[in-house]
Image: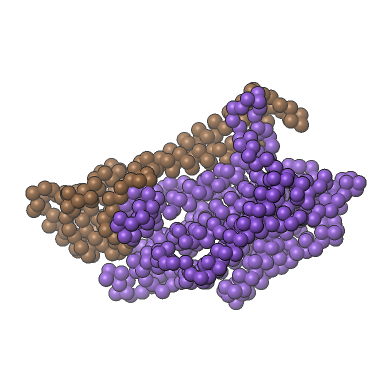
Amino acid sequence: MSPIARPFVAYFTREQDVVAATAAVRKAGLGIRDVFTPYAVHGLEAAMGLRRSRLSQVCFFAGLTGLTTMLFFAWWTSAVSWPLNVGGKPFASIPAFVPVTFEFTVLCAALVTVGALFGVAKLWPGRTADTLPRVTDDRFALVLEPMADDNRARALCLEHGAVETFLLDAKGPESRLSAVPGAKA
Amino acid sequence: MSAPSYSPLRVPLVKQPRSMAAITEEIAAPLWRRPSASFWALFAVSSSALLLGLGCVTYEIANGIGTWGLNRTIGWAFDITNFVFWVGIGHAGTLISAILFLFRQKWRTSINRSAEAMTLFAVICAAMFPLIHMGRPWLAFWMFPYPNSRGPLWVNFRSPLLWDVFAISTYFICSAVFWYLGLIPDMATLRDRATPGSLRRKIYGLMAFGWNGSTRVWNHYEMVYLLLAGLCTPLVLSVHTIVSMDFATSVIPGWHATIFPPYFVAGAVFSGFAMVLTLMIVARKVLGFEHLITVRHLENMTKVIIVTGGIVGLAYGTEFFTAWYSGNPYERFTFINRAFGPYAWAYWTMVSCNVLVPQAFWVKRIRTSPWAIFVLSLLINVGMWFERFVIVVTSLHRDFLPSSWSMYRPTFIEVGTLIGSFGLFLTLFLVFCRLLPMISIGEVKGVLAYAQTRESSSQRTQGAA
């Protein structure tokens, strides 16, 4: 056991192994810091006990804001600020405002949602990457919270097909993995 | 245990099972290699075409729209044809990336990246035409509603041309964001593959936004990707609908038809898939991606072409029927004039390329032969260009008053601008193939299991080595 508590890492080569190991570790009551994977592994978020992302709500309200803003703006410019008679059509010709309102709704919803993702996930250009080796290539890494005795975690992971287990160097760049967003699982 | 349960009956999406590292390697490696001679040959051709286009556009802006073959009767012709053609090309990319994603069509994974890139480049080509048609493109910002010193005089929200401004700009921005979002995990893969301290690593690192493959982030990412796919689906349908309204809300015979929105959207998907096939068949050959972009992918796309080609053929028939059944003499004349008037050659080129040519895809041997698909997809591209030409020009050249009848012939400047737009499109695509992974590395890894569940478990774990 190391004097400084260090996160425990187990490497896997197959997605079904990492999902099974994550579920087993969680069942055993060990704290999961995160799992790093080269692609989105479905079922892993359930195994980690992650909540469904609530960015869909952000998307809905951003879209709603876009919709009301543009509908109001089109009405205000066409009927209030400078009403122009175009072919004798009513100033507040709501059906004709639908296409632009729709486009603006989609634009707001898309941009705000992606912006919210970058905010929540703390992604921005120039952010220093704290990547474990090979997790963007061909390895799945299960990272557990520091624990007093890692023998049980190691046994569980090896049982589920881990190819490598080690303790992260607290001084190394990977120690910033704690900066990974999201509530504790 | 919780292995993904794919039926062993499923056809593998990636031929020749391979490890994830091999996938990274083979998609990323071309970015590290020096461009081949064939790349430079293609680049020379496309950039020459682009230069010709630049020259023509410069000449047109310096001298005015009079350098085009337009006249008082035919105020829209070549450039609006090109505009509608290019917007249509873009639609296939969004269909593949968004609609097939929502339908969980996993085969899209190896073609969506380049199809989306194609969308962006096609929309850039399309947006160029209304801009230069303005004659004073430096005043293009007048199209947007902003507080100005002229009143403020606002834009006309009842005009379909303004709807177009919003539709095309929203479409471009959303497609670009969707495409970039898909690129971020791959940028991280490239960053980690690059030599530490190298310029490449810095650039890819900047573009990767600090991505580290965290499942907590993937959880949000997948949700946002789904939401964007859901937003882009109605968006793409709305874009060509609005483009068709540029015509349908007018009173010109041959344009004033309620069939236009679905007819245009189907035509857009039809032409877009033809263009995707044309490009993919070349790209998979040149880059050696035949096992990732398989014949099955090509075959699936030809099936989409059969369906949308059928819709387009039905629309041609319906237009004729409506022209006769409506009893409107102007409408009736326009359609007879299309088929038997001075532009009959354009009409019959359109019908043979768009209705007859795709029928060849009913034959399995043609559908699975890349060479045959390549030739047929080129013909469809030609046919769809002529469809727009027929709609725009034949309706205008003989309208209500015979005294204003006229003929239209493109000038060298207009033809040069069209060639230039192809040059722009191909140059951008070639640069994209050199700088960014043409196939989504992460997504292809996600569908590897489709092939692997068919193999024995010893082969399955060969990636562990």
Where in the figure is residue B188, as x and y percent of width and height? 36, 55
- Is residue A17 positioned above or below B262 on the image? below
Residue at 81% across, 53% down: B408
Front residue of this view, candidates B393 and B304: B393
Asked whether residue B143 appears in the rendered view, the answer is no
Quadrant location of residue B24?
A: bottom left
Q: Is residue B404 shown left or right of residue B53?
A: right
Quadrant containing the N terminus of chain B is bottom left
Asked whether residue B239 appears in the rendered view, the answer is yes
Chain drawn purple, letter?
B
Residue at 59% across, 30% down: B146
Where in the figure is residue B341, as x and y percent of width and height? 86, 58
Where in the figure is residue B356, as x and y percent of width and height? 71, 68
Quadrant containing the C terminus of chain B is bottom left
Q: Is residue A97 shown left or right of residue B406?
A: left
Rendering colour (chain A): brown
